[in-house]
Image (tube, helix red, strand yellow):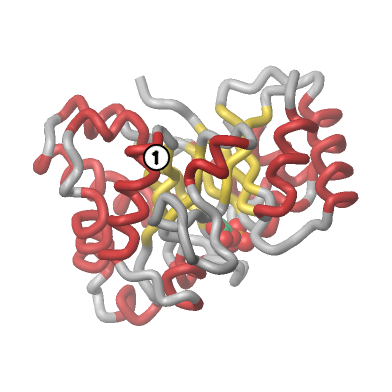
Amino acid sequence: MRNKIVAGNWKMNNNATQTKALINDLKASLHNIKTNCRVVIAPTSINLSLAVQETKDSVIEVSAQNMHQASNGAYTGEISADMLLDVGINTVILGHSERRTLFDESDELLAEKVNTALEKGLEIIFCFGESLNDRKLDNHFLEVGSQVKKSLFHLPEASWKNIILAYEPVWAIGTGETASPEQAQEMHAFIRQIVEKKYNKEVAENVSILYGGSVKPSNAVEIFSKEDVDGGLIGGASLNASDFTGIITAF
Ligand code: PEP
């Protein structure tokens, strides 16, 4: 049985005071709610330690937004897997489209990051998605398939228990434009199908596939109702406790 997951990517938002306040608001709004999904937040790296402390004794899990592929060394400004583990982080987002486009992270580099994260025992929320141009040219299946294959299909079957997939069409991220529930379902089913073809039905059926791209309380119910959509990776709406809670309760 695959997990249902709602994860909030806070990106470069919220200082320490705001991090604490948002976590407290979230804890308060989740207090009387019976959630049937994992709830994950990904604050900026400088506040990960604080977030771990503030979320202990709650259902909220904390993820990092990125990490470096090397174990340690002369990589000014970077953060290693061990450093994440050391402050109590067990999950890392890799491959977000902002990392791919603004920081030139290639499929090959992401494969290295995936390897390091898994070797160290981290769980990965692995993001991928097509550009608007790919979608217009009807290249979206090809592009998404290629991103998934190049960064993940070298992995042994056993590694897949630590992989969560997140389909995020780039044209829907932070734009207010959402893929229709049908477009999300169609792509998620395609991803499950290529995973089954490469591995087997069990791996394909057990991997959670999240949708990301302008998910809000008003559209979450419809998107999450689709068979192959196992949750969401949420940007903007995760910065507000009541919106994020609204999305969580969509399950
Ligand atoms: C994201 O950046 O992962 C994302 C889905 O953002 P938004 O929800 O704001 O579109």
Residue at 69 percent across and 49 percent down: it is: 238
Residue where numbered disc 1 is placed: 164
Q: How many marks?
A: 1
Residue at the front extreme, as displayed: 73
Residue at 51 percent across and 69 percent down: it is: 98
Q: Residue 234: x and y, percent?
A: 60, 51
- The answer to which quarter of the image holds residue 204 is top left
Residue at 52 percent across and 55 percent down: it is: 66
Q: Report the quarter where the N terminus lies.
A: top left
Q: Residue 12: x and y, percent?
A: 69, 63
User: Is 104 placed above or below 70 here?
Assistant: below
User: Is 30 placed above or below 184 here?
Assistant: above
Q: Residue 231: x and y, percent?
A: 50, 39
Which structural element holds mark 1?
A: strand
Residue at 54 percent across and 62 percent down: it is: 78
Q: Residue 196: x and y, percent?
A: 15, 37
Inspect the image, locate mark 1, and give the three-letter code of the amino acid beneath it: Ile
Q: Quarter of the picture for ligand 1?
A: bottom right
User: Is 223 placed above or below 31 here?
Assistant: below
Is 222 on the left or on the right of 245, as rendered?
A: left
Is 109 on the left or on the right of 30, as rendered?
A: left
Label 1: how many Cα within 10 Å (few below 14, some 14–19, many 20+): many
Q: Report the quarter where the C terminus lies.
A: top right
